[in-house]
């Protein structure tokens, strides 16, 4: 019998699941169109049927791990997620437990990916690290003393909402100057548009990456500015938990040295002396396409690992 | 037999010790002039003799807790403390163990006070809180998941060195714009001097407090500016660990509403919506005069408590 945890990543358009063993091997995968389900219970029912179909007789289902926007780990709920049709507070973990008859854990997507890095990625064995996802927003997870920090309400790790510029860019959260308005895919697009004085140019972060690769100076400058802001923010971030490493994940982090070099330079120029040349800023070890599934499944494998180490 | 932990606070001029029971009662106290001892080993020998004298026959010494500048919890050492005569890396915990024949734990003073708040102060039962000392500098300790965060190198919790102003005031750390250059006793003095356009005025934070109390507008303004900067910095700080409460301790924190009101107003104006009106900024419950001893002793009582809960 192979012990299996299901990792499920809830997205606004599609949700994916994978059957993951303790080594991080994905035995089967599936996708369901989240947006087609007006009611969360019906969605869970449908995806649970798919999961049962995917399980083979030599597999033993241990538990379910769910990564979801605005996921509350303590309550197993999704709370007021702007990108989902399901409004209010949704007890998604409970629905999964009812359908699959095993324990279900749920957290937000960045936290799930953080634990994924710890269990299956480049943070194996690290007790103190910072995990940053650079995508449509800036998500983060913080591990200290070997544990993910949830805070008193399960909403810790909102590094994207550190205010880095007084009266800066308007953020989706309603405030101004949040880090994610600069250091994210839309953030670098805005920076590039400002550099070329064309507010309405249709361009993506990937386009800017391609331009920079081909030597375009304004595109390279956009990466430099993004890295400078990120590096200073990371220098300010390490004072809280003194992480050993900082992992960058997500589309923008795949830009390689174009982003990493200015980020590291700004970090070293701004960090407190005791940490100069000591804290590494490195790429995530998670494969972009499987990270969401592995992250969600690892939520369970982490607990399982801890439990096993105690017996 | 009363079980006793010795709490020792190492200061640049004087060091104090107290015999503390598990309820936080101090049974005896003593002081030794740190600055008189050129060699750390001789100092430890001398203070250990005083401690032994203070112990009565009905007391059982369990362990020693030491709060010291630049204290490294993992190694039990004081490392390059600028305000002490003892240079380099000093294995102070080891010296205490040799002299008193019990386990000795050591950490920096702000961390010791943080654990003091948790064991004997207003943070009893809280798993997630932030502790800020506003004195000659801005020290801090962070508790998450019920544990003090030390980070990978024992130097976590340097909130005083978050850069809050680009090209701001010169800090003792060699950089510019650190929070503690604004929010500390010397910080408010500098702010007041700027407000009255007199850079060289001889005045203390306590004098500014007295002026503000008597209605002096510039002094009140100095507190307002200090609180505004502190409130924004705290709003940015809570994104990391989502604390339930923030405790303010130290001389400047004793200014009451003069400091707390603008701090809370700025915090609420700047904090992410999910935490508005949810995180309390409150005074420490530790008595200023005994906090150092209680904090250092609590370092041991905390471990003891955890150990006892496991058996």
Image (cartoon, coloured by chain):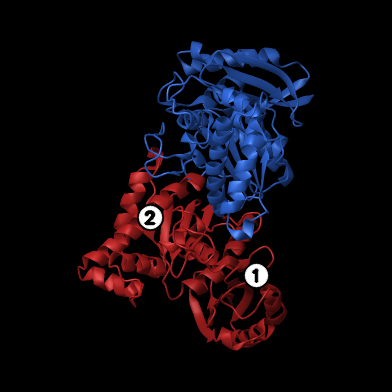
Chain colours: A blue, B red
Say left or right for B133 vs A149.
left
Report which quarter residue B253 is drawn in.
Answer: bottom left
* Residue in the image at 65% along x and 82% along y: B44
Residue at 37 percent across and 41 percent down: it is A167
Q: Quadrant of the N terminus of chain B?
A: bottom right
Q: Is residue A102 visible?
A: no
Q: Is residue B285 visible?
A: yes
Point out residue A59 in the picture as x, y percentages from the top left corner: 75, 21
> Disc 1 marks which residue?
B79
Q: Chain of mark 2?
A: B
Q: Is residue A89 left or right of residue B33?
A: left
- The quadrant in which residue B194 appears is bottom left
The residue carrying mark 2 is: B229
Label 1 residue SS: strand
Mark 2 on the same chain as mark 1: yes
Image mark 1: chain: B
Front residue of this view, candidates A90 and B21: A90
Task: Using the image, determine if residue A38 lies above or below residue B199.
Answer: above
**Is label 2 in a helix, a strand or a loop?**
helix
């Amino acid at each position: 019998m192979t012990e299996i945890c299901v990792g499920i990543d809830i997205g606004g358009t599609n949700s994916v699941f994978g059957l993951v063993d303790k080594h991080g091997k994905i035995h089967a995968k599936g996708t369901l169109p989240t947006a087609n389900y007006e009611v969360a219970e019906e969605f869970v029912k449908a995806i649970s049927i798919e999961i049962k179909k995917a399980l083979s007789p030599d597999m033993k289902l241990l538990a379910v791990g769910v990564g979801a926007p605005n996921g509350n780990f303590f309550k197993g709920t999704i709370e007021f997620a702007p990108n989902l049709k399901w409004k209010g507070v949704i007890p998604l973990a409970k629905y999964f437990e009812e359908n699959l008859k095993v324990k279900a854990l749920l957290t937000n997507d960045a936290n799930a990916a953080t634990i994924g890095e710890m269990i299956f990625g480049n943070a194996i064995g690290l007790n103190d690290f910072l995990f940053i996802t650079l995508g449509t927003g800036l998500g983060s997870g913080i591990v200290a003393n070997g544990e993910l920090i949830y805070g008193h309400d399960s909403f810790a790790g909102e590094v994207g909402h550190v205010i880095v510029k007084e009266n800066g860019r308007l953020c989706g959260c309603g405030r101004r100057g949040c880090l994610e308005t600069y250091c994210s895919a839309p953030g670098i697009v805005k920076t590039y548009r400002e550099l070329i004085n064309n507010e309405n140019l249709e361009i993506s972060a990937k386009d800017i990456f391609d331009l920079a690769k081909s030597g375009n100076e304004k595109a390279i400058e956009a990466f430099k500015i993004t890295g400078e802001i990120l590096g200073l923010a990371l220098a300010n971030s390490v004072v809280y938990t003194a992480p050993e490493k900082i992992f960058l994940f997500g589309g923008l982090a795949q830009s390689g040295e174009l982003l990493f070099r200015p980020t590291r330079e700004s970090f070293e120029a701004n960090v407190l002396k005791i940490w100069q040349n000591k804290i590494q800023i490195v790429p995530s070890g998670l494969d972009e396409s499987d990270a969401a599934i592995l992250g969600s499944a690892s939520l369970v494998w982490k607990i399982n690992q801890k439990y096993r180490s105690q017996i």
